[in-house]
Amino acid sequence: MLDMGSLPLANRLENLGSGPSNTYPLVVYYCHNCALIQLADLVPRNEMFTDYLYLTSASNTMVEHFDRYAETITRRLGLAITDKVLDVGSNDGTLLKAFQRRGVGVLGIEPAQNVASIAEKEGVPTITEYFDLKLANTLEKFCVVTANNILSHVGNLREFLANVAKVLRPDGLFVFEVPWAADVLRNNSFDMIYHEHLSYFGLKPLVKALGIAGMSLFDVEYFPSIHGGSFRAIASPSFKEPSPLVKEMVAREDKEADFWAVRDFSGRVPILAQRLREMLLGLKRDGKRIAGYGAPAKATILLNYCGIGRDILDYASDTTPLKQGKLIPGVGVSIVSPQFARTKPPDYYLLLAWNFREEILAKEQEFLDKGGRFVVPFPNPEVVDS
Ligand code: DWN
């Protein structure tokens, strides 16, 4: 459907003086049978998830979102101190800490040692391994298993879901969040396509995949402002009638995430990339200084695919200490701290962390009041002043 060429790994930030990054093919395919959108070229997981630089707690939006998440599930299931939640891909433990604050037992699984140790230091018991069958066979049964922004990253979806079913109590629930493919297409957010994200899900292929694992997807909640539009689905080992919203979203996917929608999206991507690059080059010609706001994984794809490098961006600022002092791979844009950025503010920020537009524009009101502006890349590149 879409060939984005050979691009660097999104989170494999470069160190100063390190040679050029390896690149890997990034080609998107559509399955006419189950409507799954996915990559066909699998990068070895240890290349991507060993030393991981993304922290859930890097934004207030996600910390607050996961606090509400824990509240909703705790209330819905009446979880008590005797209950235990297993979070697969628990990162720095942000969600599990929210369950702990509500007196619920927790266990995390996070293969990236550097991130898992942050969670452990903060009192979140975390197993530093991949959630494979060998590990699943050693675990107890849980009343709740969660997996957020993880299903897209899984190399073998069938095996992963079979492992979830193996560690779930018969009355347990599997709760997971993923970006909604229909929103990626609608929002033109082609920077969400990168090697870590093997699959781009609608509910349709997930209903099928969970069915194969003996689980039924029966409820869903939709979050339009999380990662550009995400849904939180709930599945059970016993059959439950799908909710009206599940049926409605599946019906919408027939129009908004079908072959034609993917084809039209694929046609728009190179046009939008060109438009963004030309907009920035125009600002440079006018003598404007531009910098990136945030250095999310998706910035690696946006900047490399659009050909936006150090000739256009002075730097990119990011709140994540693990990223500061490194370079965005393939384009060599240096990542600095927000403190440094405030000493050298640009005229324009390219909002690379566009999924946190509300939080960031509120935080940068002073910059805007002084005449600073943001270039927002999606759904169509535009300059905003508030
Ligand atoms: O799927 C994935 C999602 C969940 O997270 C992973 N594959 C990797 C990662 O993707 P991402 O890096 O694109 O995620 P975010 O959450 O969009 O990253 C935002 C970045 O922006 C972080 O590095 C923190 C930074 N940031 C900032 O510098 N100032 C964020 C905010 C809100 C800010 O004010």
Image (cartoon, rainbow, N blue to C red):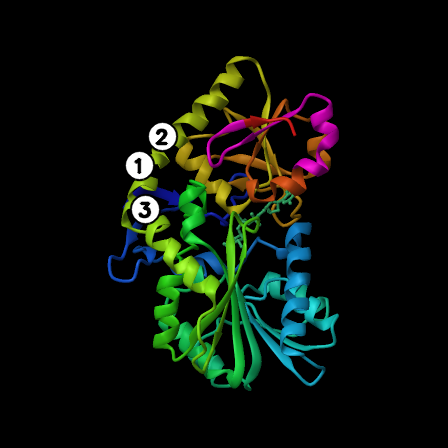
Determine contact: label 3, label 2, CB under 8 Å: no
Where does residue 183 sit, x and y in percent of width and height? Answer: 45, 48
Where does residue 218 sit, x and y in percent of width and height? Answer: 46, 71
Earlier-in-chain disc, 3 versus 2: 3
Q: Amino acid at mark 2?
A: Ile
Residue drawn at x 57%, y 82% is: 142
Q: Amino acid at mark 1?
A: Gly
- Give neighbour class at mark 2: few <14, some 14-19, many 20+ (Cα, 10 Å): few
- The residue tagged with tag 2: helix, strand or loop? helix
Residue on which disc 3 sits? 262
Determine contact: label 1, label 2, CB under 8 Å: yes
Residue at far top of view: 286
Residue drawn at x 63%, y 64% is: 69
Residue at far left of view: 32
Residue on which disc 1 sits? 267
Earlier-in-chain disc, 3 versus 1: 3
Above or below, 49 against 379 in this view is: below
Where does residue 145 sit, x and y in percent of width and height? Answer: 54, 75
**Hey, which quadrant is residue 156 in on the image?**
bottom left
- Magenta residues (range): 361-382
- The residue tagged with tag 1: helix, strand or loop? helix
Above or below, 172 against 71 in this view is: below
User: Is 127 covered by the magenta stretch?
Assistant: no
Residue at far front of view: 244
Q: Which of 263 and 373 lies nearest the eye of the viewer?
A: 263
